[in-house]
Amino acid sequence: MLGPEVLHIGFGNHVIMNRVIAIVSPGSAPTRRLIQESRSRNAVIDMTNGRRTKAVLITDSGHVVLAPINPETVAGRVSSSKGNRADGEYED
């Protein structure tokens, strides 16, 4: 592998794909609580550029990334990126 695979999440913002452990929508009460708790410990990364949060990405480091694109779109980009790997194998 040449380097970390990045995932475009809108407005020129990217995250390292292998660090994301969950992609959820921000509407549920547990997700809103997670965002608030993460804000209180300075672990929220807001990549919405002032737009509405449509997806919340949870990383293995405990950071919470707010994204302006739908969770389905993010998941689709992850799967299409993994499907386009040259060697055809997935890395865990």
Image: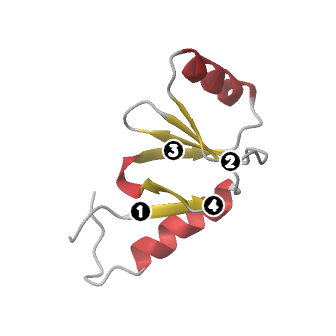
Horizontal side of 81 relative to 67 (left or right) equals left
Please identify the quarter of the rendering in which residue 26 is found. Answer: top right
Alpha-carbon distance for marks 1 and 4? Answer: 12 Å
Check disc 2 and give the amino acid type: Thr
Which is nearer the eye, 68 or 12? Answer: 12
**Local secondary structure at mark 2:** loop
- Pick the front one: 5 or 86: 5
The extreme left residue here reads 1
Q: Earlier in the sequence, mark 2 or mark 1?
A: 1
Which mark is in front, 3 or 1? 1
The figure's colour scheme reads secondary structure
Q: Which residue is mark 1?
A: 6
Q: Is residue 29 left or right of residue 19?
A: right
Dot placed on the residue nearer the N-terminal end, 2 or 4:
4
Q: Position of residue 72 (x, y in %)?
A: 66, 60
Q: Amino acid at mark 4?
A: Gly
The residue tagged with tag 3: helix, strand or loop? strand
Residue that mark 2 sits on: 48
Q: In the picture shown, does residue 39 fall above or below 85? A: above
At label 1, counting other C-alpha atoms closer than 10 Å, the crowd grade (few under 14, some 14-19, many 20 or more) is some
* Amino acid at the residue labelled 1: Val
Residue at x 58% of width, y 68% of height: 76
- Badge 1 marks a residue whose secondary structure is strand
Residue, disc 4: 10
The answer to which of marks 4 and 3 sits earlier in the sequence is 4
Whichever of callouts 3 and 2 sits on the residue coming sooner in the sequence is 3
User: Counting other residues with Cα less than 10 Å from the Cα at mark 3, is it few (<14), some (14-19), or many (20 or more)?
Assistant: few
Tell me the CA gap for discs 3 and 2.
Answer: 18 Å
Residues at marks 4 and 3, CA–CA distance in whole angstroms: 17 Å
